[in-house]
Image (cartoon, helix red, strand yellow):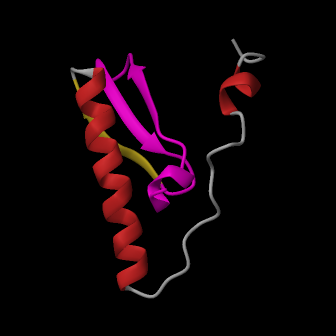
Amino acid sequence: MKASARYAKIVEWSEEDQCYVGSSPGLLYGGCHGDNETEVFEELVEIVEEMISLYEAEGRPLPPPTSGRDYANKMQHVA
């Protein structure tokens, strides 16, 4: 398993920006954007992997993992 799998990746439509915006809460916010949801997700995965590499290269500890926290089910109560 890649270290990037430990971080939730969210791609959502932004009415304000009129495009899809990708982020990884706890690691980076507003990491990428574009018109194609799939392409934004693929770019987000690459950015998360790059962020992890930067943390490691600088000898900094990674933020706590965010995957596996069941965000989708928790967010159902918001909608």
* Image location of residue 44, percent across then percent down: 33, 43
Question: Residue extending furthest top?
Answer: 79
Question: Residue extending furthest front?
Answer: 1
> Which residue is located at x 54 percent, y 71 percent?
62
| Relative to 79, residue 44 above or below | below
| Relative to 6, residue 60 above or below | below
* Image location of residue 17, percent across then percent down: 30, 24
> Which residue is located at x 21 percent, y 21 percent?
35
Say whether residue 19 is magenta.
yes
Q: Nearer the viewer, residue 20 or 61?
A: 61
Q: Quadrant of residue 69?
A: top right
Q: Nearer the viewer, residue 7 or 77?
A: 7
Seen in the image, is 9 located left or right of residue 14?
A: right
Q: Quadrant of residue 20?
A: top left
> Which residue is located at x 42 percent, y 76 percent?
55
Q: Nearer the viewer, residue 57 or 25?
A: 57
Say whether residue 11 is magenta.
yes
Q: How many marks?
A: 0
| Relative to 9, residue 63 above or below | below
Seen in the image, is 29 located left or right of residue 39?
A: right
* Image location of residue 26, percent across then percent down: 57, 55
> Which residue is located at x 38 percent, y 16 percent?
15
Q: Quadrant of residue 53?
A: bottom left
* Image location of residue 45, percent across then percent down: 35, 46
Tell me the magenta residue range: 1-27
| Relative to 70, residue 47 above or below | below
Q: On the rendered image, what quadrant is the C terminus found in?
A: top right
